Amino acid sequence: MSTYSLPLIYINGQEHNGLSTLDRGLAYGDGLFETMLVVDGLVPLLSYHHKRLLRGLSYLGIELDSDRLVSDVNALLDIAKSTREKHLILKLTVTRGVGGRGYQVDSTATATLILQLFSANIDLSKHNGVSVHICKESLFPVSWAGLKTLNQLPYVLAAKERQGSAFDEGLLLNSQGDLIEATARNVFIVKDEQLLTPSLNESGVAGAQRQFIIESVAGQLGLHIAEQKIKFEECWNADEIFLTNSITGIWPVTHCEYKQQDYTWDVGPITRSLQAMCHSAFFEE
């Protein structure tokens, strides 16, 4: 059996074949990416990642051969099975490819497909509660709201704010003070036994775990769910708050610091029920 050292990087189906400095993903952020949890060689939320990727490719007008996509992903998943590590991370990046200098799209550009396989170090203790702060960085309306493009500088700057602090995450607002998401996670609040999550029609990334809860899990638990505008101040009166991410699962928010005041929440029954449904296939040993 072959042995592999992680991380593995494949570009257009070849290991370490190099990326052109003229690639539009590098030059302009002209592309998309998906970061997926691999459990025992399988991606539990693969269909949700695939749907979002296809929406993004269609919106950006990037053509990627579906057979090539499937075969390259399957090749990496076969390698994942051979590593005998239960949890891995597969990052898939698609760029428009090499298209010369300048913003104008070159119609002859061929998409670049980059696959990276990493070890996963998931801190399960955060499933019992995390501390967050409010980011100074804010989000603004974009036409590609909901998609996961390579234009992620606001999130990089927001995440940088908590370096050296004890916070586990940061909450992002828009310029009107509406809650949108966290730096690497979507946010839900529970109020009066209803499940609410911010509308992402103007900004934010619609995560795969978020969609799984909205489209499948909430209904199975008999929960009413609404995507709507949520004013930041509504958080203080929430019964429960939690964050979702397809790699790390559901993090209950138990503490938030805002303007030198501390706010706290319990890990409530709805959060625990959602964790039981969403984590059963992911994190059980």
Image (cartoon, grey):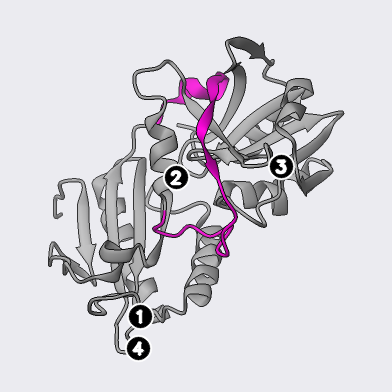
Q: Nearer the viewer, mark 2 or mark 4?
A: 2
Q: Nearer the viewer, mark 4 or mark 1?
A: 1
**Eyeballing the image, is 87 above or below 22?**
above
Q: In this image, 107 relative to 17: left or right?
A: right
**Residue that numbered label 4 is attached to:** 107
Q: Mark 3 falls on what kind of element? A: strand
Q: CA distance from mark 2 to mark 4?
A: 29 Å
**Eyeballing the image, is 188 above or below 61?**
above
Q: Earlier in the sequence, mark 4 or mark 3?
A: 4
Q: CA distance from mark 1 to mark 2?
A: 24 Å
**Residue that numbered label 1 is attached to:** 104
The residue sitting at the top extreme is 261
Which stretch did the figure color magenta? 122-151
| Contact check, label 4 and label 1, Cβ < 8 Å | no
Q: Nearer the viewer, mark 3 or mark 2?
A: 2
Q: How many marks?
A: 4
Instruction: Report the amino acid beneath label 4.
Output: Ser
Where residue 249 sits in the image (x, y, percent)? 53, 36
Name the residue at 46% across, 24% down.
168
Q: Earlier in the sequence, mark 2 or mark 4?
A: 4
Q: Dividing the picture into quarters, in which one does residue 275 lie?
A: top right
**Residue that numbered label 2 is attached to:** 154
| Contact check, label 1 and label 3, Cβ < 8 Å | no
